[in-house]
Image: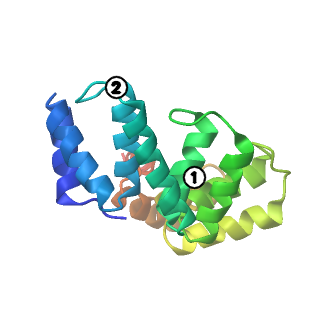
Amino acid sequence: MARSEQFAAAMEAYDQDRASDALRLMESCAAQGDPVACYLAALWRRDGEGASPDAKKSEHWLKELMRLAEAGSAEAQWELSSNYRWGGLLPVDHTAANHWLERAAENGWGAAQHHLAWYLETGQYGYSVDREASEAWYRRAFDQEHPETLYTFAMREFKDGKITEKAIALLAKAAGKGFKQAAHVLREHRH
């Protein structure tokens, strides 16, 4: 999901230490159904960024994030998965994290597809190693040009430690989508 101009203005205000303006703008974005804005509004309300800490308002925005996820927003599902996996607003709960990760992946969220593939490949977070399922999820993320997956596929294209034309093309595509590690590898191999 592309962030709105208002979201950008909220982040700019936050970066300029204008926390009350940032909170007002972010809550406006959250009220319009932006899942990341719901997360940030909940976090900022909990931590007292821009206003006194307010557990009830924090809970309100967290419930809105959950409502969006239940309604099928893949981005909201990804946000919940991340929060359950690493903590923050929610307690660490890998079962809940995996539930939301799978829903986000099924609903086409590239980052969720990539991470699910990785967990199935490596057997992390309660997943059993399943190379076939892992490769299927990687392929889905690759087909929609998820930058980290493009990078992963580029690394597979190296031959005997040397970069290939196909690897260069995939790295360039990933770098063009903002994946910094891809840009770094391109620089290292193009000197």
Q: Verify CB contact (< 8 Å) between mark 1 and mark 2.
A: no
- In the drawing, what numbered circle is on residue 162? 1
At horizontal 62% and vertical 33% (from top left) the residue drawn is 91
At horizontal 69% and vertical 39% (from top left) the residue drawn is 93
- Asked whether residue 145 appears in the rendered view, the answer is yes
Position of residue 189 relative to residue 135, above or below, is: above
> Which residue is the extreme one toward the bottom?
143
Kindly state the secondary structure of the residue where label 2 is placed.
loop
Between marks 1 and 2 in the image, the one whose residue lies nearer the viewer: 2
At horizontal 70% and vertical 51% (from top left) the residue drawn is 98
Kindly state the secondary structure of the residue where label 1 is placed.
loop
Query: Where is residue 56, by image quadrant?
Result: top left
Q: Return the residue nearer the eye: 79 or 90.
A: 90
- In the drawing, what numbered circle is on residue 96? none
Q: Earlier in the sequence, mark 1 or mark 2?
A: 2
Quadrant where the C terminus sits is: top left
At horizontal 84% and vertical 59% (from top left) the residue drawn is 130
Q: Say which amino acid is labelled 1.
A: Lys
Q: Return the residue nearer the eye: 97 or 58.
A: 58
Label 2, on which residue? 53
Distance (Cα) linking label 1 and label 2: 54 Å
Q: Position of residue 119 (x, y in %)?
A: 72, 50
Name the side, left or right, on which 80 lies relative to 2.
right
Q: How is the image coloured?
A: rainbow
Q: Say which amino acid is labelled 2.
A: Pro
Q: Position of residue 178 (x, y in %)?
A: 36, 54
Name the side, left or right, on which 150 lies relative to 42.
right
Q: Position of residue 173 (x, y in %)?
A: 41, 65
Quadrant where the N terminus sits is: bottom left
Position of residue 19 relative to residue 156, above or below, is: above
